[in-house]
Each structure stands twice: as structure tokens, then as C-alpha cells.
Image (cartoon, grey):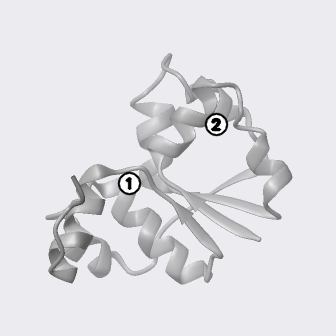
Amino acid sequence: MILVLDASALITLSRVGCLNLLRDLAEKVYIPEAVYDEVVRSGYGRPGSLEVDQAAWISKRGVHDQSVVDRLQPELGRGEAEAIVLAGELEADFVVLDDATLYQSILRQAGEEEPS
């Protein structure tokens, strides 16, 4: 199984000491460059920074189609947009996101209302 994750998923799993579960769950775990920058570089000293930086089993990858990332960015952060595009490029089995803005955007595009 191939997983692609965004920053919030990595940070949350690191906070609860469960980041290594991903290694047991998937054959390959990828994060886009923007997620690495957000968690490791910009988030230096915060939960997830050291864990992600030291996890040799997490592969950092650049996104090839920046035009799709740019189209998604008005609604999403760069990390989330790159995670979605990278998942498509790698034909990942799952993309793991935890983003209320993304959820609301998907509901709007589907013409549905958020459940109360």
C-alpha cells in the first residue's frame, strides 16, 4: 500500500506517539516537499519535526504538475494541495488529510451542506 500524507496527519500521529504505525501499515509512505517544509523546517522544535526528519522510511517527493497545485491553492494550503496532486501522480492507495477547509470545499463543489 502507498500512502501520501499532509502535515496535520503527521503532526497528530507524532503527538500521540503513533507515527511508526504508518511504517507497519504501508509499504511506502510519501510526503510532498511543502509538507516536509511545514513540519520539519518551519515547525522546527514543534511536535512531529524531529520524528519526521529522522524517519528514513518516509520519502519526500516533489510534485511534477505545479499547475494543478496552483489551481487547488485558492481553497487549500500548499501542503494539502501538493499531497493531493502527489497522491494522484504516484497512484497512491490513500491520501491522508485532516483539513476542515478541504472538507467544506468538497461539500460546496458537490452542492451539499455540511452535516450539523
Q: Looking at this rendering, what residue extends furthest in the top direction? A: 45
Residue 100 numbered mark, or none? none
Residue 79 numbered mark, or none? 1
Residue 60 falls in which quadrant of the image?
A: bottom right
**For mark 2, what is the residue?**
52
User: Can residue 76 be seen at all in this image of the molecule?
Assistant: no
* 76 relative to 23 in the view: left or right: left
Q: Is residue 18 above or below residue 6?
A: above
For the point 48% across and 52% down, the residue is: 6
Q: Is residue 11 above or below residue 59?
A: above
For the point 39% across and 31% down, the residue is: 42
Name the foreground residue: 12 vs 52. Answer: 12
Work out whether mark 2 precedes mark 1 in sequence or the reverse, and give the earlier one: 2
For the point 41% across and 52% down, the residue is: 34
Amino acid under disc 2: Val
* 1 relative to 68 in the view: left or right: right
Residue 76 falls in which quadrant of the image?
A: bottom left
Q: Secondary structure at mark 1?
A: helix
C-alpha span from label 2 to label 1: 15 Å
Amino acid under disc 1: Gly
Q: Is residue 113 above or below residue 99?
A: below
Residue 81 locus on image (x, y percent): 34, 65
User: Can residue 49 be seen at all in this image of the molecule?
Assistant: yes
Residue 39 locus on image (x, y percent): 48, 36
Residue 13 falls in which quadrant of the image?
A: top right
Neighbour class for label 1 at 10 Å: few (<14), some, many (≥20)? many
Residue 35 locus on image (x, y percent): 46, 49
Quarter placement of the N terminus: bottom right
